[in-house]
Image (tube, rainbow, N blue to C red):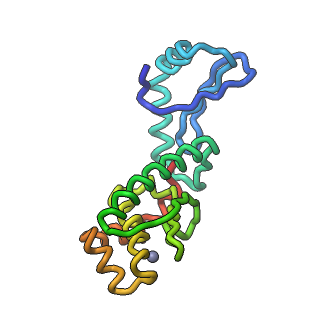
């Protein structure tokens, strides 16, 4: 059964099913161990209107604190990022005729990507919440460092030859990069 909102089910040694809307507007269903999925589905269905109205309220009230991402979700995002960046790096490296060694996925507040002198690439997994051209830009940027280990005009000419609109993505990162830390 498909519900009009995502939710997590948290099983524990409780006796009843309960729904909780977190401050980050996530729906959490608390259920006893062994509770059948069909029961949870109908439980949610009966309260759908109520849940949707709470979600609407939560979404319209400004958030003061950044949401904590549960570890399991975070690991999932990191794996997604690994798959995305592996694929994009391979794609653009061929176009740009450059090589690289290892790809690592990092979480650094101040960095979206980096390229070591040995050719290892690092990418920030938070980028998966950015528009796709921004991901492409960060990949092409780091790969361009395989030719120019600086941010000279020659470096940006390489970037521009692959992504003529790269300045828009660079601007997006400057203007909105910070918001990626709020996404989850
Ligand atoms: Zn750079």
Residue 29 falls in image quadrant: top right
Identify the residue at image location x=45%, y=46%: 60
Identify the residue at image location x=63%, y=15%: 35
Asked whether 64 or 17 is in front, the reply is 17
Residue 152 falls in image quadrant: bottom left
- Residue 122 x, y percent position in the rendering: 52, 64
- Residue 176 x, y percent position in the rendering: 42, 64
- Looking at the image, can residue 175 be seen? no
Q: Is residue 162 above or below residue 152?
A: above
Q: Is residue 80 above or below residue 7?
A: below
Identify the residue at image location x=42%, y=67%: 99
- Residue 165 x, y percent position in the rendering: 26, 69
Identify the residue at image location x=57%, y=35%: 21
Asked whether 131 or 135 is in front, the reply is 135
- Looking at the image, can residue 167 be seen? yes
- Residue 158 x, y percent position in the rendering: 31, 77
Q: Is residue 32 left or right of residue 39?
A: right
- Where ligand 1 lies, by quadrant? bottom left
Question: Which residue is farthest right?
Answer: 13
Give the mark count.
Answer: 0
Split into 4 quadrants, where in the image is the N terminus?
top left
Q: Is residue 117 left or right of residue 91?
A: right
């Amino acid at each position: 059964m498909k519900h009009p909102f995502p939710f997590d089910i948290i099983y524990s040694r409780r006796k009843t099913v309960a729904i909780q809307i977190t401050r980050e507007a996530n729906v959490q269903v608390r259920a006893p161990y062994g509770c059948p999925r069909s029961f949870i589905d109908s439980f949610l269905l009966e309260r759908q209107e109520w849940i949707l109205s709470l979600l609407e309220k939560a979404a319209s009230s400004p958030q003061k604190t950044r949401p904590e991402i549960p570890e399991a979700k975070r690991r999932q995002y990191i794996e997604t990022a690994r798959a995305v960046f592996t694929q994009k790096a391979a794609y653009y490296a061929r176009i740009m005729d450059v090589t690289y060694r290892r790809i690592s996925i990092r979480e650094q507040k101040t960095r979206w990507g980096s390229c070591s002198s040995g050719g290892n690439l690092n990418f920030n997994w938070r980028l998966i919440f950015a528009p796709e051209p921004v991901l492409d830009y960060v990949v092409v940027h780091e790969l361009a460092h395989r030719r120019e280990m600086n941010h000279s005009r020659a470096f940006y000419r390489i970037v521009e030859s692959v992504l003529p609109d790269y300045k828009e993505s660079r601007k997006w990162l400057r203007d909105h990069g910070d918001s990626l830390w709020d996404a989850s």
